[in-house]
């Protein structure tokens, strides 16, 4: 490698550090009074996931409303057996996405002054829900929490790079984000005052959009209400796409297709630059085997990039060194799904849970 090549590698390694420089986490405030808090859980065929979430909420005194989104797997009975209030979101109005409508129905059914919208695959550590509400009480507006990813099968480890890119693209962990603010929000945990939710137009501002989190954040900012994005760390976790590769591909195709263009252009360019380093390190061993690269240099580059991937991935999820060493596989999966999402974005719709959802950025009136 020439001096220029080495410099380019160092610069792109520095970009990776910049993108995940410092993740803001939930504060260690004392338990917050949850008597006037309603947790709204939009649920479509979540019978397997719900028990873990509802057990983690037991004893919090918060009202828990599970909104059944036309499930066929016994979701309502599972929810009611764990003490949740169950309401139905059927029928689905024209122009609405299932999750957005379920959240709107849940917000209208809520009796608490604070509403926390929570995905069914999320789990709270003891006291964590109180810390989310305490963050809202301190900062106001909309508080979004990206859960710590806890994969449960080898296939789920393929999500590592998707998680890294998702966090990096929001600027939540970069010095840029500290100065200019994070871009967008994360949908698994969204907390706000019920009055503010009504003030911005509720989930009607989301309508049929796939990226309901980004749309809701935009609505709060348009009404001069702050948006705070935090990392769940050891407080809030989730298990994404436990049904295998097909669900993972479909889910991340949806997320990427809807999220294309949401990041700051400068941040998107930094993410792309860092990904080119992963491409270079992935092909380096092949080039060494073909005799077009020094084996020692290729091995060193691979090891350094794997170490950085591990450092970054373990900040967003429970990913170990073996996952990081397999970063060419992570990269290949990411690029294939990204290509699939670009096609979906061009077509204007994606498939998720048996429904077609629009990727257009238009809002409901």
Image (spheres, helix red, strand yellow):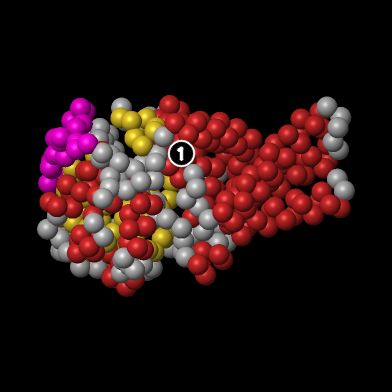
Say whether residue 191 is visible. Answer: yes
Q: Is residue 90 above or below residue 317?
A: above
Q: Is residue 72 above or below residue 43?
A: above
Q: Is residue 333 above or below residue 13?
A: above
Name the residue: 40% across, 55% down: 185
Q: Position of residue 48 (x, y in %)?
A: 27, 34
Magenta extent? 70-94
Say whether residue 314 is visible. Answer: no
Residue 155 as seen in the image, left or right of residue 89? right
Q: Position of residue 260 (x, y in %)?
A: 49, 44
80 within the magenta span: yes
Residue 341 as seen in the image, left or right of residue 28? right
Q: Position of residue 198 (x, y in %)?
A: 20, 59
Q: Residue furthest front?
A: 365
Q: Position of residue 288 (x, y in %)?
A: 82, 32
- Secondary element at image label 1: helix
Name the residue: 50% across, 31% down: 343
Looking at the picture, tell me which residue is in the foreground, 239 or 189.
Answer: 189
Residue 81 as seen in the image, left or right of residue 193? left
Q: Is residue 224 above or below residue 312?
A: below
Name the residue: 81% across, 51% down: 6
Of the 4 image quadrants, the one containing the N terminus is top right
Residue 266 as seen in the image, left or right of residue 35? right
Looking at the picture, tell me which residue is in the foreground, 331 or 325.
Answer: 331
Looking at the picture, tell me which residue is in the foreground, 209 or 140.
Answer: 209
Within-10-Å neighbours for mark 1: few <14, some 14–19, many 20+ = many
The residue under label 1 is 257
307 within the magenta span: no
Q: Residue furthest bottom?
A: 138
Name the residue: 81% across, 28% down: 289
């Amino acid at each position: 490698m020439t001096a220029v090549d080495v410099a380019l590698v160092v610069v792109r390694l520095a970009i990776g550090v910049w993108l995940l420089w410092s993740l803001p986490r939930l504060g260690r405030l004392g338990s917050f009074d949850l008597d006037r808090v309603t947790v709204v859980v939009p649920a479509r065929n979540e019978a397997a996931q719900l028990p873990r979430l509802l057990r983690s909420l037991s004893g919090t005194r918060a009202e828990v409303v599970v909104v059944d989104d036309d499930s066929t797997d016994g979701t309502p009975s599972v929810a009611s057996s764990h003490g949740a209030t169950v309401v139905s979101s059927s029928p689905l109005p024209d122009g609405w996405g299932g999750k957005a409508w379920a959240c709107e129905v849940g917000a209208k059914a809520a009796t608490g002054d604070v509403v926390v919208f929570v995905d069914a695959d999320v789990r709270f550590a003891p006291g964590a829900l109180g810390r989310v509400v305490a963050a809202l009480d301190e900062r106001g507006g909309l508080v979004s929490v990206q859960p710590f990813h806890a994969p449960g099968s080898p296939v789920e480890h393929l999500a590592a790079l998707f998680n890294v890119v998702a966090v990096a693209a929001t600027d939540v962990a970069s010095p840029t984000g500290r100065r200019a603010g994070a871009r967008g929000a994360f949908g698994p945990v969204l907390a706000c005052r019920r009055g503010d939710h009504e003030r911005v137009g509720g989930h009607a501002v989301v309508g049929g959009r796939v990226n309901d989190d980004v749309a809701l954040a935009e609505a709060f900012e348009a009404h001069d209400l702050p948006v705070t994005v935090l990392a769940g760390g050891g407080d809030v976790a989730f298990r994404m796409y436990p049904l295998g590769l097909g669900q993972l591909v479909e889910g991340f195709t949806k997320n990427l297709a809807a999220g294309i263009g949401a990041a700051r252009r400068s941040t998107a360019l930094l993410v792309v630059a860092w990904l080119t380093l992963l491409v270079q390190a992935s092909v380096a061993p092949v080039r060494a085997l073909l005799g077009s690269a020094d084996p020692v240099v290729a091995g060193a580059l691979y090891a350094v990039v794997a170490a950085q991937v591990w450092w970054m991935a373990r900040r967003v999820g429970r990913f170990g060194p073996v996952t990081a060493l397999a970063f060419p596989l992570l990269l290949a999966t990411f690029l294939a799904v990204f290509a699939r999402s670009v096609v979906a974005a061009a077509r204007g719709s994606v498939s998720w849970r048996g429904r077609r959802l629009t990727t257009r950025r238009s809002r409901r009136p």
